[in-house]
Image: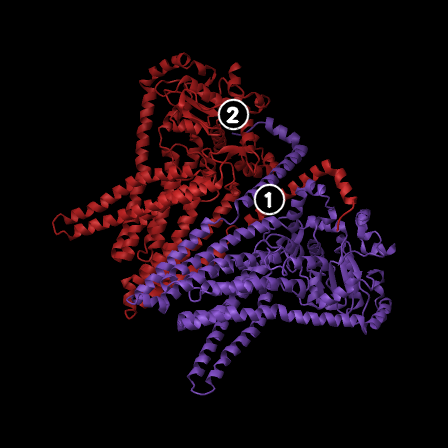
Chain colours: A purple, B red
Amino acid sequence: MSNHNLFEPEETHHFRGGFSYAEDDTKQLPRSFLVVKLSPNIPENTLLWLVDKIRGERAEGGAELLVMKQPYNKKEGVVLHISASMIKFLLVAEEMDMMKQDIFSDMNELENFQSKDVHIDDLLTVTERQNIVKHELENIRASPKDTSIPGYPNIELYEGQSIIHVCLKANIVKQIYPLHDKESLKKLGASWYLSLLNKQPFDEIREYFGEAVSMYFSFLGYYTFALLLPMTLGFVQLLVSAETVPFFCVVNVIWATVFLELWKRKSNELAFKWGTIGMTSLDEPRPNFYGHMGKDHVTGRLQPQYPRYKTNVKMYLVSIPIVFLCMIGAFIMMLASFWIEDLIRNVDSEWTPTLLLVPSVLYTALVYIVNVYYRKLATWLTEWENHRTQSQFDRHRVTKLVLFEFVNNFMALFYIAFYIQDMEMLRSQVATMLIILQAINHVQEAIIPLIVKLSTTKMVQYNLLGSDKNKRRDSHQSICSSYEPLHEIAEIHKDDSRIQEAEEEGMMEDYEGTYDDYLEMFIQFGYVVLFSSVYPLAAFWAVFNNVLEIRADAFKLCVVYQRPMGKRVKDIGAWQRCFEILGALAIMTNCGLLCLSPQMKTYAPDYSTEKWFMLFVFLEHLLIGIRYLIHIAIADKPEWVRMELARKAHESRKALKSERAKKSRRTNFSRRFKTVHGPHRH
Amino acid sequence: MSNHNLFEPEETHHFRGGFSYAEDDTKQLPRSFLVVKLSPNIPENTLLWLVDKIRGERAEGGAELLVMKQPYNKKEGVVLHISASMIKFLLVAEEMDMMKQDIFSDMNELENFQSKDVHIDDLLTVTERQNIVKHELENIRASPKDTSIPGYPNIELYEGQSIIHVCLKANIVKQIYPLHDKESLKKLGASWYLSLLNKQPFDEIREYFGEAVSMYFSFLGYYTFALLLPMTLGFVQLLVSAETVPFFCVVNVIWATVFLELWKRKSNELAFKWGTIGMTSLDEPRPNFYGHMGKDHVTGRLQPQYPRYKTNVKMYLVSIPIVFLCMIGAFIMMLASFWIEDLIRNVDSEWTPTLLLVPSVLYTALVYIVNVYYRKLATWLTEWENHRTQSQFDRHRVTKLVLFEFVNNFMALFYIAFYIQDMEMLRSQVATMLIILQAINHVQEAIIPLIVKLSTTKMVQYNLLGSDKNKRRDSHQSICSSYEPLHEIAEIHKDDSRIQEAEEEGMMEDYEGTYDDYLEMFIQFGYVVLFSSVYPLAAFWAVFNNVLEIRADAFKLCVVYQRPMGKRVKDIGAWQRCFEILGALAIMTNCGLLCLSPQMKTYAPDYSTEKWFMLFVFLEHLLIGIRYLIHIAIADKPEWVRMELARKAHESRKALKSERAKKSRRTNFSRRFKTVHGPHRH
């Protein structure tokens, strides 16, 4: 029984009866929520210090989590599995502001769920529990005593810093990831990427992957559905005469505005259902947020404090100028490739056609390389700006990245459309991108990683089954000898499937969030709305691609990648604004294309340039006006959501009032009485 | 003592000791908060029914207010003074959702105000108490038994209708108005319109006139202060060369955007301080809101319910088309006046110069007349749309009116600037408006009404002192005879100053709200930002006018008008958007004026029309972009307001949670226990 104490903190003992997994703990260890892989050459004292922090009591700066270890393997190093007691989950869920609403709405219907016989253990989904464990792990913050990491005197710590993040950066902790849940995954996959016609199972996606991923797929589904209108219009446009082009162009621009406004509504609806609608930039800070520890103005808890103006100064004086310089650099790169192409074209040689490919291939390669570095720069800058919440961080990072990507992806088209004014070239560019590049993307995103994954799985199995067996037997002996300090930690049995899973999934690719997926949609949306008037089939190819994309992304998430940590979001973040800006630019480009297109000019050959300009200005202002009206007319939140929010706010205010009334009645009754009957000024 | 029972409801008796005014009620009647003038020929049963409603118990549909009467005077009819008991004020203040926040923040600092020895009676300002009395009076709603007004079988009532508003419409009640508070008014005036250099006393204004008026003066002050920048720039522009005009033009446009964004911040700050920031369209309905009585989704109280979609249908299918037709009509009227002027100009006669004035004079007169009818139409349409809250009603009414006023005030200038393209004419128009028309406005607004007022006051005094004295003695006898039913109501002593005040103020003009004042600023702002590039002195004249305007408006409110009812607002309503639209239009007009101006053309005579167009498009897009960035960069609410709101929301949520936890612990403990220890699914 002494073993038991080691992974269950003292104060939860009296609850033990409630948790079936703890009933016979020598046979059945608690479920692993996170796997923590440590560096193989971690010094002993560092290891001990870290494990102490994870298991230690809160009062002493620990996280009070349960720790298990895998049988030791010298090559791999120490692999820890982290879990928590049931009561810990509930306590932290209560504490985390971000979770409250959610649990709340469950509590709200307490009667309801009790009658359905839902056990209190099932209140939290596995994803939520993973988040809780991660939250606690990340919130192990350096105390004033921790000036540096034991064993690494060079790595200094300051008060309030997240220790795990320092360890990750210093490569003391190699990886932290949750394990997949094979059974749920199979069920999810069957109703998702394996079914072509059904609606996506958004609730299950949310339960398994968290709100951010579910929001992405909701957006993707909604967007694809909305695309059916411009797709139909595109086909019609091909059939009718060119004189109607302005009509389609106007409709397309309006479609983009309406779609984005409706999506905003939809996302608010989802956020309300998911209990994330109340998220603000004043929520609990993300782990990497730094500042001196102080009392939070909102919650009164001890949290890092960092003045907002400093972030603003860094942003406006440093980050934005740097981003602009990078954009200008990218623009010059693009121009250079066109110039070189022009130079080559003018050389009269039999090699010219072949040579003509060189600049664009070089440019593509260069963009790819520069992008890798720019991404690092953007992440570093955003980290340095020190935004408080994860949503803010993501928003500012995405904004920086998108600005750059915009130059890389669209500037060439703007150049072709409005400087060279070659409509044929523009059309072929748009078509190439939408058909070929998207196909390449699918291969790159889903098929290649799948092959890689299958081969690594085989390798792992081979390792585990084959020659590795002996090694493991060796290593098993060595735990006691070389990692004596860990002897008190419960060890997962060597035949436990979790060990193989941890090894396999540790080798899988890390899902870096929804950024790349949204970016793809962003670029596609740009092609569809910015240049729809020259290539009416754009929407069709977008739909075709997206139907595949939904399956490919789903497949990739379920099968190819490590299980991502759930991330709570209330909307698509910076992307909403990015898409809206594209929608606004579409007004300009479409009006411009219309007035420049030679096709239109043949229908009104007597129009002077001046008249075309006036037409452009008139059409553009009309569309800007319509856009503004649509923006006003469509409310951001559906009426029922506003009503429910108002009801909740009203109830809360009432509760606070009655609480205060009770309190003041208790403490101030005599004073109050005196005041009512005392003299009064007038 | 029997007299006392008549104006103080039963249930408040035990609180009597606390209210000094009730101590000797035969001598000292409670303060009058509202004066209700009834029609002189009101039938006896109507009068009784109405008084019963005002004094009756809530359970029977009454308002539980205190009623006093003036000595009867046949010519004047019955004049009632309405008040309420102290406990009633506190109860209603608690009940009115709109007041809660306010009282709340006082309660918040209960300790604080007790130590400062503020009596509980002083918790509510006089304006707030007037609002409470008005709220209760307006919320006397027809019960199912009241099918028509007694004595007026033709005036039908339906359940839930506001009786007082029906009576006002049917002229059964002639006037309802609060009385001025001479002493406070004198103090307020001294620090407001009589002091030229001090800051306006916004807190005192708010206390006396309510939030809406204080918000208007805050806006006016803020706007005038902001104008100092374009004023300075205007002077500089006069001195330097014309080549710099584009620079000033760009700066002016940016100034307008920044000013409006900063004002939004400022108004949120004020709204937070005033406790109105939480106002939404789901607040308590205004008295004229109709619908079947039902349980409110937010508060659970019985309130009229009217589906939002019906309002939307009425708005989009009827009101908006009508407003557009009216705008087109106004536009045609404007064109016609120009055409006629042109026609006359072509006639070669000695009368031509004189005749040339005819169309514009006619047009001005016509606009004035049409405006009166349009205003009625807009009010009627907005009433018919049936918006729930007063703020919504005001917003939609203002929007309708402003659209029409926009055509009347600015279309002619657009026509001159972009169709006739006569910059000299434009300049003189702008200057005329800013200098002469504003001066006329001052005279019309403050000086004429003052003269009227002074003469009426004299008349009233003459009436009261002179021949009327005998009459009054007569009338005093007739109370008992002709108005027997009212004998039980406390009568104000004939020498009480309130009688003269009620008579005087009843004859004063009714302040119809801030609409006209904002409209003046709107038009001025339009002249300043839309055409600033042709007339750099515009801002100077605007500042000059506004410094006078503040005093004139203040004087007018304090001296000329009836005391207005306080109105709670959280911002300047539709005006924010209206001003913003002007700001956006300013981009277009200024860029257009720049590219058209002959002055600019002399500096680049070799530019083709095409080039000028390109310059226009480029400059315009640049400014639109900058505007958007400014809009993003300036947060709507200051950080500290966001923080305070988040803190309140957090506290409320916590209170609700603990309340629920307590409740569920009490009722469900056994069940809960069972669940924790029972079997659970997995």
Q: Residue furthest bottom?
A: A349
Instruction: Say the numbered circle drawn on residue B648.
Output: 1
Other-residue count near label 1 (Cα within 10 Å), few / some / many at <14 / 14–19 / ≥20: some
Other-residue count near label 2 (Cα within 10 Å), few / some / many at <14 / 14–19 / ≥20: some
Instruction: Look at the numbered disc 1 and give the secondary structure of its residue.
Output: helix
For image coordinates 67% across by 39% down, the residue present is: B659
What amino acid is found at the position of numbered circle 1 in the picture? Lys
Q: From where the camera sits, is residue B294 visible?
A: yes
Q: Quadrant of residue B12?
A: top right
Chain identifier of the residue bearing label 2 in the image: B
Do badges 1 and 2 share one subunit?
Answer: yes
Q: Quadrant of residue B514?
A: top left
Q: Quadrant of residue B439?
A: top left
**Count of numbered circles on the image:** 2
For image coordinates 49% across by 83% down, the residue present is: A354
For image coordinates 39% across by 29% down, the residue present is: B169
**Whole-percent x and y of residue B643?**
58, 49
Instruction: Look at the numbered disc 2 and give the secondary structure of its residue.
Output: loop
